[in-house]
Amino acid sequence: MKTLVMGGTRFVGKAIVQKLILKGYDITLFTRGLNPLPSKVTHIKGDRKTEDLEQLKGNRFDVIIDTSGRSREETEKVIANTGHPSHRFIYLSSAGIYKDTEKWPLQENSPIDPNSRHIGKAKTEEWLSSSNIPFTIFRPTYIYGAGNYNPIEKWFFDRIIHSRPIPLPLEANTITQLGHVSDLAEAIVSSLENNSSLNKIYNCSNSEGITFIGLINICAIACGKDPNELIFKVFDPSGLNKKERKIFPVRLNHFLTDISLIKKDLDWEPRVSIEEGLADFYRNDYCLNKESNPDFSLDDILN
């Protein structure tokens, strides 16, 4: 199938493209050209936030995968230039759009937070759901794995490797949820070959949640360190925004989604355990790119 990927050379987009290539898709990437391109793709160089997008006019695609859209307007402009895809529009949204709750795990029909920093993605979902565009939407939680440019794994590894006190909220048993980038890419490509996913929205992450302290301990083991030798700097998060990610790399409240729908519809299961995923990132990403002097200044302001 003739496929357009908005993005495709970094992290999630890169993982998706690798799997599409193996499946024999005819791939066009629209990127700013800042990263190496895979072989066997057509490349259109441009910035989607400018008139560069008009380069897509006259092109028609069976599949469009939008990995980089953050607002309804950005996605609308893609469709305005390409027309509707004949098979499917894949949109990468975020579980970050959900409203705070006392009921866990979050379902696909759980309330949306109108003040979410991802509200542009929620607006895009609304527009797709009310259009005649055949779509599938994915709402991952925290994505981790090869090529992650968000400081999740790195945040923990930096402090463990440099023997720093690790900031830890008082509620160390708060549960969060990570999903490996390879599993997300596999689910997205699988959805293109499954009619059950047509016009569906899916949570997509690991099957299990993990506590903050559990996550830190697994990171220590991945580094070859004894979790019992870690030093913690316990802080009270009560005065902080629960979704603040500068002091701690994941939100400070529970964050757990139900992925039973995607497992049922796609006959899909996450394959990468968090132990395997973190160990792989440490060996093949962190060790090759670690900084000699990471910035720990925010740690120092904690009481």
Image: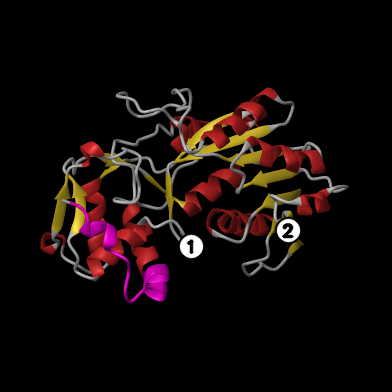
Q: Are marks 2 and 1 in contact (CB under 8 Å)?
A: no
Answer with the quarter of the image where residue 7 lies: bottom right
Nearest the viewer among 276 and 199 is 199
Q: Between tags 2 and 1, which lies in front? A: 2
Q: Which residue is mark 1?
A: 147
Work out whether residue 106 can be spotted. yes
Where 278 sits versus 178, above or below? Answer: below
Residue 171 spot, x, y in % from top left: 18, 40
Q: Which residue is mark 2?
A: 46
Residue span colored magenta: 283-302
Q: Is residue 300 magenta?
A: yes
10 relative position to 297: left or right = right
Mark 2 or mark 1, earlier in chain: 2
What residue do we see at 73% from left, 44% from top? Answer: 63
Q: Is residue 42 magenta?
A: no
What residue do we see at 57% from left, 36% from top? Answer: 120
Residue 17 spot, x, y in % from top left: 63, 57
